[in-house]
Amino acid sequence: MAKLTFKEFRCVVDTDEMGDESPYFLTWVGDSRLKDSRIKFSRKGFWENKVSPGPWWPVNDVVVNDDDFDLSPLRTMALAAMVEEDEGTDLTGDEVQAINNQMRTVFKNHVNSGKQVQDADFITIMRNTFRTEIRSRVADTSGADDDLMEEDNWKAARRIVLTGTGTLDLVTFKGGNGKYEARYRKD
């Protein structure tokens, strides 16, 4: 059984926002053999306006715990994005599922056309799709939209390298002059 868990994160440098921060995360996993995907929205109430540079914050959210997903780096792509909440979370459960539905469609179409999950252009397409789908849903015409963590030359959708088991390579998010690190575990 393959299992991917978002274990913890830390704020290395806080963003330009006033006061402590309220981050939330989206983790997406696509399996090319199954032509299927999963998405996990991670947000905890005890993070609300409490996150500042320093300690690791526990998450312990299982992203995939499925007999069918093997999480092989040859067949599976995993992406993560972080959003700094401004005035309430801009994403609903239905919107998170809509993001997954669009990601699944794009992923499946490219797999059907012969793309491999380790192809650089396929990874770029999926990262851009993930970014676009999230960004379109966190935008708010009142100006109180949540901030997708990204900077020039630092894409919002970060790739989770699935090589090996145990604690995986750190995933780093940058944006709004801030920097966060996240740890995922593969069992």
Image (spheres, rainbow, N blue to C red):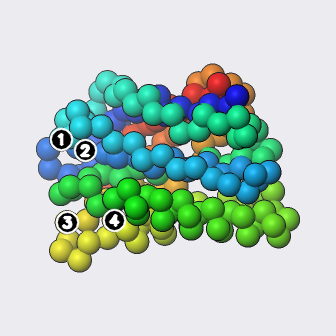
N-term-proximal mark, 4 vs 3: 4
N-term-proximal mark, 3 vs 2: 2
Q: Is residue 35 above or below residue 52?
A: below
In this rendered view, identify the residue nearer to me: 102 or 83: 102
N-term-proximal mark, 4 vs 1: 1
Q: Alpha carbon of mark 2 to alpha carbon of mark 4: how far?
A: 14 Å
Q: Furthest residue to the left?
A: 19
Q: Which residue is mark 1?
A: 49
N-term-proximal mark, 3 vs 1: 1
- Image quarter where the N terminus lies is top right
Q: Alpha carbon of mark 3 to alpha carbon of mark 2: how far?
A: 14 Å
Direction from residue 42 to residue 124 in the image, left or right: right
- Write the residue at 81% across / 57% down: 116
Q: Which residue is mark 2?
A: 22
Q: Alpha carbon of mark 2 to alpha carbon of mark 1: how far?
A: 5 Å
Q: Furthest residue to the bottom?
A: 141
Q: Is residue 184 above or below residue 90?
A: above
- Write the residue at 81% across / 67% down: 112
User: Is there a contact, CB below 8 Å, between mark 2 and mark 1?
Assistant: yes
